[in-house]
Image (cartoon, helix red, strand yellow):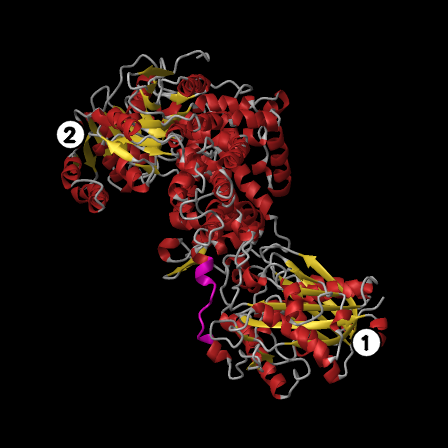
Amino acid sequence: MDAFIFDHVRTPRARGKADGSLHEVTSVWLASRPLAALAERNRLDASAVEEVVMGCVSPVGEQGGNIARMAVLAADWDQTVPAISVERACGSGLEAVAIAAGKVMSGQADLTVGAGVESMSRVPMGSSGGAWAQDPTMSAKTHFIMQGVSADLLATLHGQTRRDLDAYAVESHRRAARAWSEGRFARSVTPVKDFVGLTLIERDETVRPETTIESLSALKPAFAEMGQKYGYDAVALQRYPQLQRIEHMHHAGNSSGIVDGAGAVLLGSAAAAAKHDLKPRARIRSFAAIGSDPTLMLDGPAAAARRALERAGMQPSDIDLWELNEAFSTVVLTFMSVMGVPHECINVNGGAIAMGHPLGASGAMILGTALDELERTGKGAALVSLCVAAGMATAMVIERV
Amino acid sequence: MNSRTTVVRCEVDADGIALLTIDYPGKSMNVIDQAFMDSLQHCIDRVRNDASIKGAIITSGKEAFVAGADLTAMEQNLENTADDPPPVLFEKYGSLSRLFRNLETCGKPVVAAINGVAMGGGFELALACHHRVLVDAPTAVVGLPEVQLGLLPGAGGTQRLPRLIGIQAAMPYLLEGKHATPQQALEAGLVHELAPPAELIARARRWLLETPKAVQPWDEKGFRFPGGNALDPRVAPAFVVGNTMLQANTHQNLPAPQAIQSCLYEGSLLPIDKALRVEVKYLMTVARGPVARGMVRTLFISKTKAEKGLHRPAGFPPFTSRKLGMIGAGMMGGGIALVAARRGVEVVLIDRDQATAERGKGYAEKSLSKQVERGRMTPDKRDAILARIHPSTDYELLRDADMVVEAVFEDRAVKAEVTRRLDAVLPADCVLASNTSALPITLLAQASTRPERFIGLHFFSPADKMPLVEVIRGKATNDATLARALDFVGQLKKTPIVVNDARGFFTSRFIGAFVDDAIGMVAEGVNPALIENCARHAGMPVGPLAITDELSIDLSVHAGEAQAKEFPDEYRPGRSVPVLRKLFELGRLGRKNGKGFYDYDESGKVLWPGLAELYPLKPVQPKPHDLKQRILYVQAVEAARAMEEGVLLSPADGDLGAIFGVGYPAYTGGPFCFIDGVGVAAFVAEADRLADLFGEQLRPPQLLRDMASRGQTFYGRTAIAARQGRFA
């Protein structure tokens, strides 16, 4: 059975700090806004929704205890709508859409939502702890290193230079600024209002079109001290002894930004489309996840993309548009070179380096970004992918109908 | 000792205070073994059951409190438990832990009156008491040094210490085996009070009479882990970063600190009884591995035996040097002079001119003054030591020397000249030792009129820091000379190994096998970064290319040429020779001129990119695992050859020499422990596989094949017989 995408909304992304525009609303409120928007703009009786799957990477504190269910209730959706939170690190939002789509494809639901949320300003990255870094046994077994050091490791392995990484980052800002100025996000971005009706944010806050290679060159590598002083480089070299050293090249300017945001995708069967008067915008062709080396952890998207393509019976050449989460410049540069994808076909409207990466929400956001772009350009198929902590990646192929 | 031996005496006084005195019959130190445990359990039962007993004091009848486990018995146990199933092992390894738990839950207050050194299990016993009074004496020290022998404190040490002082404060004691003096122990909270020796028992008694408490803090309701448990935000970084630092430093070669880290992490999340179970599981895992066995054998048992005169011929009176002639005032001569002067020996430090001799003394001045600056030595002490070093050019001053060491230029003619001059002045019984690292003692002795008094004493640089002396017996060296040389090494508080005379003796040929093979890898087209990393990851202290740069490439080239000239028949150019010669011709002399295998500048060193042009990288590089194996095996195979040829008298000499002399990784316990740990048959198979991959230098000698087929080992019940005496 086919799963179709009917609609997609996302919030603007706010700086994930105390002075960010979304810091003053609870993460549950934030999570509920795309749900409320979906129901409102589609004049949908939300009680028809049979499942809400929501990605969230730090499901503790106010994001804990199954935030998806609280978001459903906060959105004033009917109490009969069930909800589940999922955590696959940075892939959570796309994984939520995949699971929601899977319920439709397996014939176990007709109308579902895949969503994601992360209020990084309120529940900081790493808040949920976990055995990977903390349990001595698992840290040793996996050769755990900090993700930024992994990014520098990946760039070093592929011989990328600081200039390569910075140039990519500059282009991300340029493209994001152009997309905003041309209104390319208008269909999906919905402003966030608080509970008294004040509009808190209408646009992504972290895009800096004035960014240049020169301005970035002033930034110091962010992970050098961590790598050299706290042993992460040494552990990385234990896994990659062919390297003489880790070249530290990533910094705040060529890594994804820390932001708050949420997104949601309305999915369903052909029957649901007819029943609720919804127009299918795209069909989900396939999705796949893979596991890879937990130390390097950021090189998985190529394998995930290949697996998803194989499942769809497609070739890379069948894909018109690629969307890969910009966790770090090196992730996209490596993917482009491994998959042979030209820069003009990937992340054409910028990405997380410019607009930020609200961890659990990103997958549910960039899927919609890709869909909007397919429609804008009249193209057919897109592949969306994200690299995932501890050595994983997830990918999804969609096709306009 | 059978289990009825009374190791712990129990005397009850009129106040109902039981004094438990640990006083192992027939031993100078209290050690923990089965008899100790049975005896202590007996006393605990009495304290618990006898209503007239109000509390107990545990102290020792020896100078030290308890030195720890009986490691010799433990080493045998490791072998005896090899085939036990997990439930049996869990019982065995948990017995001491349960005993101490019985003690702290016996219902009566118990004080440890720590009258001296309390190490390992001895300190764990004290930690299981409700109150600790430590004698305030300079000889007293407490600590948990198990990690240094590849073990962990498995009788509650990893659980009680963090529950007393917090996880982060406990880490250095557990993970590094840090010791504490009485003052440090009091400040850190390891003990509750200090007492002068005469008041120790009285203080313990006073606590029992005035403020007794029979419940440990961790057994009280509402106990909170001091500083927070492992998941507390204040402590979590100590694990996130600590786990990584541990791996960065140990390359995952040392299971013990890893297990201790896990005991701290997992144990802090559990109530004490469950936590103690987890600790025992990690203990049995670590104790049964080859690393603990090898480290206990070599770093403790063999080292102790060597220092107690394993190879000292009997029948010669003990010798104490009063006047040492030190010929050659270079870095080595200066270092040896310093060591001897510190041990009270008058040293005549001779070189060709007075200025050079003075410079040799300068080494001692600099080293001792640094200690004075750091407050570790008084200026008076320094001056007294320096006053014993007499720089001179005059051999006449040696007419009453009882020991002479020469460390002049490594050239037979130069050494022969020195020998002749010494023969003219030395008393008849004075031993002449050469510090050569490669020239055969038998040949050098030919220059002497008294070759039977000639011996090799191979010190390692820097001589004041390196603990090993390789004693080389020449063909003519007599037993009296060997005895005197070993006594002299003992006087310097160094660890001796005794080897027979052959080119490179043991240590030089052993380290040479590694460096030669590793530089040979460059010629094969192995990525130099991979070579360096794999060596370090295998546990070598420095990469082979870096160490060659440090020693300087011209030195290596000249040493090879000298060997070729000196021994035209025996000399076989190593695989490294063409590579070293090439670099030498290009003027790349090593660190000293800023370019060798590496390029050097202020910011550090980078592998010279030109190497890849001289030796293009193989398109398919060897697997890192295979290279690490190659690095460990090429040396172990060389050690086995030295054993086969009779250069080594016992595996202990080889293991001690490898670890303490030339940096073979301590976690192996040395090449022979390593071979045993792998299993001789498995070692032979792996060495053959590596030889097929990388060359005949890795082919195991016949000795190992014979041992494998006979089921023999180097240590333990199936050990091959040790060799006696010198080889023909």
How far across and how far down the image is residue A343, in percent? 65, 76
User: To which chain does the residue with label 1 belong?
Assistant: A
Which residue does the image show at 82% across and 66% down from the upper left? Answer: A313
Quarter of the picture containing the C terminus of chain A is: bottom right
For disc 2, the marked residue is B396
Is residue B523 placed above or below B512 in the rendered structure?
below
In this rendering, position of residue A24 left or right of residue A289: left
Can the viewer see residue A241 in this picture?
no
Q: Which residue is mark 1?
A: A276
Query: Which amino acid type corresponds to the residue marked 2 in the rendered image?
Result: Glu
| Closest to the observer, A217 or B476 | A217
Left or right? Give the position of A116 relative to B718. right
Task: Name the quadrant of the N terminus of chain A.
Answer: bottom right
Q: Label 2's element? A: helix
What mark, if any, has residue A373 been given in the picture? none
Q: Residues within 10 Å of mark 2 (few under 14, many from 20)?
A: some
Residue A134 seen = yes
Proximity of marks 1 and 2: CB atoms separated by less than 8 Å:
no
Residue at image position (64%, 39%) is B692
Which quadrant holds residue B207?
top left
Badge 2 sits on which subunit?
A: B
Which of the two discs, 1 and 2, sits closer to the camera? 1
Report x, y in % for residue A51: 74, 65
Q: Position of residue A224 (x, y in %)?
A: 46, 62
Q: Which quarter of the figure has residue B690? A: top right
The span shown in magenta is: A217-227
Q: Is residue A225 found inside the magenta-colored segment of the image?
A: yes
